[in-house]
Every structure is written in structure tokens, then in C-alpha cells.
Image (tube, rainbow, N blue to C red):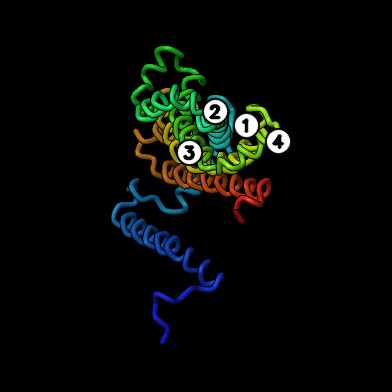
Amino acid sequence: MKKLINYTPTPVNRTLLGLLPFVLLLLLYMASSEARLAINPSDKLLPSLGQMGDAMYRLAFEPSRRKGELVFWQDTLSSLGRLGAGVGIAALFGLTIGLLTGALPLLYSFLAPLLTVVSLIPPLAILPILFIIIGLGESSKITLIAIGVAPFIARDIQRRTQEIPSEQLVKAQTLGASTLQILVRVLLPQVMPKLIDAVRLSLGAGWLFLIAAEAISSTDGLGYRIFLVRRYMSMDVILPYVAWITLLAFLIDYLLAALNKRLYPWEGKA
């Protein structure tokens, strides 16, 4: 008899096993919701799937009375715009600082201690400072995401750059390459796939900072909507919004992984 530790599921079984926990959780939720609603039909804690569907239909397909916009899609576009801008700025900053400090010992000695200290500052703790200095507009939200994510990306790229074999740098210098040429033609192509991986890992924190900023000061966005309706205990809106954020995070991560594989197919093999 084959031991359990040696059993490897087939691709089909692996897919089914991966879906099983979600199906069980859904069935458990449906049973719990039905039980609570049977006792109290006006219960808001565990709305039925039909109630959540009705709420999301109103937000997604019926124009708002106040502005005439489709609230759900406007919230999604606003949040994705802020997240994309913040993470994009963080990626550019992190790549630049990480590559330079990882490749140039002089800059490493000068900036690495500061980068380490900055990475230890809780970004949410400086949110009031950003609101005071920058204001309550879009800039403060994007800046919070960038500040929260950039140090992580920079330190990761710095470490990845330092891991590149020094023999490559010696060979490039032997062939007459300048410092700029080594940075651009030797080091940069090798750290780019690492940058995409670092962005993927930092997206969780990016979503956290985005929702926190929207909850405190915003007029639209996924985080804003969740904290707006919580005062009415509108779980029929909150739960679908949380599920939608999770789905968006999964899709963005999947697309970045596919992009990395497409642009740098050699990375996985290496």
C-alpha cells in the first residue's frame, strides 16, 4: 500500500482538491445564513446569496441617484488607479535605489542604513502627516502606497543585485564596459524579473494601505464603500466587496506572473 507521504495527486485531482475548501466554506456559509434568516428574516449579519446579488446589482447596474454613476465600477476604477499609481512609483523608486545600492558599494554604505530605517517605519503611522503636508486629495493616498511599498522593493532588488556573480562584472569590465553599461546591460536585465516578483509580493501591503487611506479620506473607492456602509451593517455589500477585492488581487498577481513568464522565460529555468 502506497504511503500517504509518497502520494502525489494528478493535475485533475490537484484542481479538485484546491476547489474543495472553497466549496465547503460556501456550503457552510449558506447553511449558516439560512439558519439565521429562518429565526430572524431581518438579520443582517449573514445575508443570503440572493440578498447580496440584489445589492450588487443595484450598485453595478443602476445609476446612483446623487451622481448618476455606476457606483461599483466607479469604486473599482478609482481604487485600481490609486493602487497602480502608488505601486508603479514604488517599483520605479525601488528598482533605481535597489540597483544602485546593490551594485555600487559606495552608495550602499551611504544609503543602506537609511533605507533600513525607513523600511521599519509603519506607513500607517505617517498617514496623518501626509494628510497635513499633502492634503486629503489623491496625492496623499498614492504617496502612502508608494512609501509603504517602495522600501520593501528596494531592499529586495538590492539583495538580488548583490547575488549576481561577480565574475559577470569582471568579464564585462575586461571587455571595456563602463559602470553605466554594466548597470544597464548586465545587471538590469537580470533584476527585472525579480522586480516583478517583488511587486507581486508587495501587492498585499499595497491593498492594505489603499483601503486604509480610502477609509479615512475619500469620496469613492472600494475601501471607502466598505467603511461607508458598515455603519448600516450592510453585510450584503461588504462581503461581495471583500470578495471582489480578493478576486482583483488574484487576477493582478496572475497577470504579473504571466507577464514575467512571457518577458523572461529563462528566469524559471534558471
User: Residue 245: x percent and y percent?
Assistant: 49, 42
Residue at mark 4 to residue at mark 2: CA–CA distance: 21 Å
Who comes first in sequence, dot 2 or dot 3? 2
Q: Nearer the viewer, mark 3 or mark 4?
A: 4
Secondary structure at badge 4 equals loop
- Secondary structure beneath disc 3? helix
- Residue 108 in view (yes/no): yes
Q: CA distance from mark 3 to mark 4?
A: 26 Å
Q: In the rendered structure, are the residues bearing label 2 and label 1 in contact, judged by CB atoms less than 8 Å apart?
A: yes
Q: Bin the neighbour count of mark 4 within 10 Å (Cα to Cα): few under 14, some 14-19, many 20 and up.
A: few
Q: Amino acid at mark 4?
A: Leu
Q: Earlier in the sequence, mark 4 or mark 1?
A: 4
Query: Could you tell me if the residues under marks 2 and 3 are in contact, i.e. CB atoms within 8 Å?
Result: no
The three-letter amino acid code for the residue at tag 2 is Leu
Residue in front for this viewpoint, 191 or 76? 191
Q: Which mark is residue 100?
A: 2
Q: Image point 59% across, 48% down: which residue?
A: 257
Q: Secondary structure at mark 2?
A: helix
Q: Residue at x 43, y 31 (%)?
A: 209
Q: Which residue is denoted by mark 4 in the rendering?
A: 175
